[in-house]
Amino acid sequence: MILECKDLTKTYHGFPALSDISLQIDEGHIIGLLGPNGSGKTTLIKLIAGLLSPSSGTISIEGNPVGPASKSLISYLPDHFYLDGHRKVKDIIGFFHDFYRDFEPLRAYDMLGKLNIDPNQKLKTFSKGTKEKVHLILAMSRRAKLYLLDEPIAGVDPAARDYILQTILSNYDENASILISTHLISDIENILDQVVFLHKGRIHTHACVDELRQETHKSIDDLFREVFKC
Amino acid sequence: MPWNLNSDRPIFIQIIEKIQVDIISGLYMPGDKLPSVRELAQEASVNPNTMQKALSELERTGLVYAQRTSGRFITEDTTMIDELKSKLAKEIVTEFLENMQKLGFQKEETISLLEKTLATEKSTKGEADNDTGM
């Protein structure tokens, strides 16, 4: 098992953002973390990544508590830009190479080339969508056990989105798992094999996508719209 | 080769159907080696586990067989492929007849309409052939 969360609760100033989350993720899966705005997706990802600490409950990643050991196994893509825009892409790649033992610069350069991104340019010269692509490429160029991708394709055009999904499919190996939070369900649901629906800080559903389709005769996108109808 | 998968039906079932048609239509010949799970999953843009499930199911029915180290192959049992072909054809015809019935067509009317359509198709096709001949 790659990830195990037990009775996880996180409160912000008394307000519960996540309540009693128990979640187990085995290796070799691509899991969609889906839920309306404010349902706790980013909080859950940040807890697993070790950027927040839980109010109660435990998290273990391949048996390790959250800490240096777990962080070396996790490649985390935040939902916002965090890299210094004044640096050139190739310098950032060098930085990642120094920082992460499992980072493979060749894979990063290969993906940059396929998306026509010039590594000699400074990050701040790129459009929002291209910056997103660079961040995702960096996250996917590590040989991690668990990838946490928080809204990876929101600002990216549909053609590049397809390429990025292909990239995700071709870059992950059977021993790793990917947790993707997104609102663009219809774009990614075919590459998922499991979904977790979060509702008001609790797990509403954790199931295999094809089983959900078989039971409901609906796409995951339609099901989401039905479950979370406003 | 687009896969045209819909999201409202289980993906693994649609993959099975697609590979069945590829076998019947001769895109895959008896004894051909199938690409790896990974390659097929990338081509179809689906999760490798979903592709794996579809192939295991095809294996269970005998249409595809696995050889320990060298991968998966299309069955060499042509009778089985022929049987699948007539089964699928029958399903298509049954569905067509049901739809025609919904439109209010009696069987005889459907048949005469079919014949008429086939006849016009033949004549227009003939014209087209003449055009290219000129």
Image (cartoon, coloured by chain):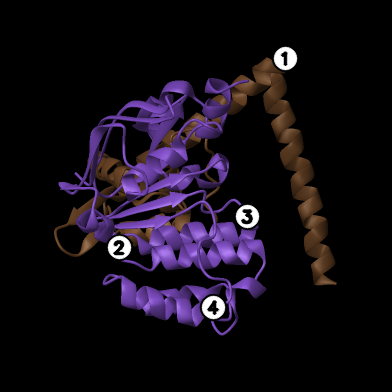
Chain colours: A purple, B brown
Rendered image quadrant of residue B129: bottom right
Label 4: few (<14), some or many (≥20) within 10 Å?
A: some
> Dot 3 falls on which chain?
A
Circle 4 residue: A87
Residue A24, how many percent across, how many down?
Answer: 25, 36
Which tag, 4 or 3, sits closer to the chain's start?
4
Determine whether label 1 and label 2 are within 8 Å by CB: no
How far is the residue under mark 1 from the one under mark 2? Answer: 46 Å
Residue occupying image coordinates x 55% and y 30%: B93
Determine whether label 4 and label 1 are within 8 Å by CB: no
The residue at the far front in this view is A13
The residue nearer to you, when weighing A153 against B78, is A153
Circle 3 residue: A155
Image quarter hosting the N terminus of chain A? top left
Q: In this view, does A7 lie above or below A97?
A: above
Residue A95 visible, this angle: yes
Q: Label 1: state its secondary structure.
A: loop
Label 3: few (<14), some or many (≥20) within 10 Å?
A: some
Type of amino acid under label 2:
Lys
> Dot 4 falls on which chain?
A
Residue occupying image coordinates x 32% and y 41%: A53
* Foreground label between 1 and 2: 2
Circle 1 residue: B104
Q: Is residue A92 above or below residue A221?
A: below
Type of amino acid under label 3:
Gly
Circle 2 residue: B33
> Dot 2 falls on which chain?
B
Type of amino acid under label 4:
Arg
Lateral position of residue A156 relative to residue A223, left or right: right
Residue A216, how many percent across, how many down?
Answer: 47, 22
